[in-house]
Each structure stands twice: as C-alpha cells, then as structure tokens.
Amino acid sequence: VVKSDFCGIAYNPPMLFRRASPRFPLILGLAVVGLAAGLALAAIFSLPHIARLSPVEGAQGVSARAPIRLTFTRPMDHASVEAALHFSPDTAGTFGWDGSTVTFTPNTPWPAEGAVTVTLAGGQSQRGLPLLGGRAWTFTVGGPRIAYLLGEAPNLWVLPLAENAEPRQITTEANGVF
C-alpha cells in the first residue's frame, strides 16, 4: 500500500511481509490444533458404525427362528463383517446382504428360553475404513407357545406352554383379524 502526504511518500508493506506479532506462534499453534481436532472429528464421524440392529439389546420372547439384522452407516466389506460376527451359543447359518444391511439366518432354531449373545468384533467398510468400536448385545428367546384367535371379533392371543403361564392378547382390532 502506498500512501502520500505533503512530506513525501510512505510505503506500508502488506501483512505478509511485516514483522510477526509476538502472539503469532500461539495463534498458529491454536490454528493447527483446531485443524487437527476438526480432521479427527471428521474421520470419526465418517467411520462406519451400526445404525440399527435386530433383535435389540435385552429383547425378550424373541422367536427361536428370528434372524439377526445389522444395518451399517456405510457399505461394508461383506467378508470382513461375516468373519467378525460371532454368536453364543455357537450357531451355523447363512448370511445375506441388502445394501448396507446384513442378515444372519440360523440353520437351526435358537435355544428355547435361552439367552443369545451376538458379538461384532471388527469389520471394515468397502473403502477399508475400520468399524467404529465393537459391539455385543444379548436377547432372550421365548419358549414354545400357541397362537390362537378368540372372541366374537376374533383377535390374536398367545399362550406360552410353560406351567402356570397366562394367555396374552396380541391384537385389539374392533372387527377382529382374519
């Protein structure tokens, strides 16, 4: 920037060429830390993670033939997820994929009135990004039960086959279900 006054011409250099402020290292350090924190947060929020799962943690009375479904936030590498997914009790089954959702269908029913623990200990996205954290959850399988229709406007009821079990009404449709 060039300024003129009655005494002569004065040159005022751009900020880039001026002597740095004594606070410049502090400001630069804070800028670098802020940039690093922003990049770290962006990386964390772009890493794949489980968006939905079924049956949910703590579910009770789950069907002995219920499949396990996991939906991820990113398209996943199928082989890595399938290798990292474990069940207790150990159960053989088949995997199927629909977009970012994997479904595990057991070959034999889950044990009646038993707990099933599902553990996902790894996996990666199709781009090679690691799954954000492992996940384990447990649900309880219901025992055998009979479903039946009852009433003038028939609604669905369920009766567990356990001793002293009480029937439970499932639907409450005014015109019944057919």
Image (cartoon, rainbow, N blue to C red):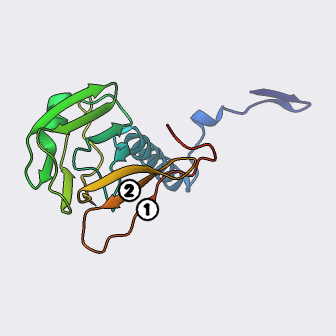
Of the 4 image quadrants, the one containing the N terminus is top right
Picture layout, residue 28 above or below residue 60 = above
Q: Earlier in the sequence, mark 1 or mark 2?
A: 2
Residue 18's quadrant in the figure?
top right
Q: Tell me the residue that label 1 is attached to.
A: 168
Q: Position of residue 100 (x, y in %)?
A: 34, 30
Identify the amino acid type marked 2.
Val
Hey, which residue is sitting farthest front in the picture? 152
Q: How many marks?
A: 2
In space, the residues marked 1 and 2 are separated at their CA atoms by 5 Å
Name the spot of residue 102 as percent of width and height, x first. Answer: 27, 33
Q: Nearer the viewer, residue 2 or 51?
A: 51
| Residue 52, x across and y down, in percent | 39, 44
Apparent side of residue 120 relative to residue 75 in the rendered image (left or right): left
**Residue for point 32% across, 28% down:** 75
Whether the residues at callouts 1 and 2 have beta carbons within 8 Å, the answer is: yes
Q: Secondary structure at mark 2?
A: strand
**Three-letter code, disc 1:** Arg
Question: Can residue 30 be seen?
Answer: yes
| Helix, strand or loop under label 1 | strand
- The answer to whether 167 is drawn above or below residue 119 in the figure is below
Q: Residues within 10 Å of mark 2 (few under 14, many from 20)?
A: some
Tell me the residue that label 2 is attached to: 158
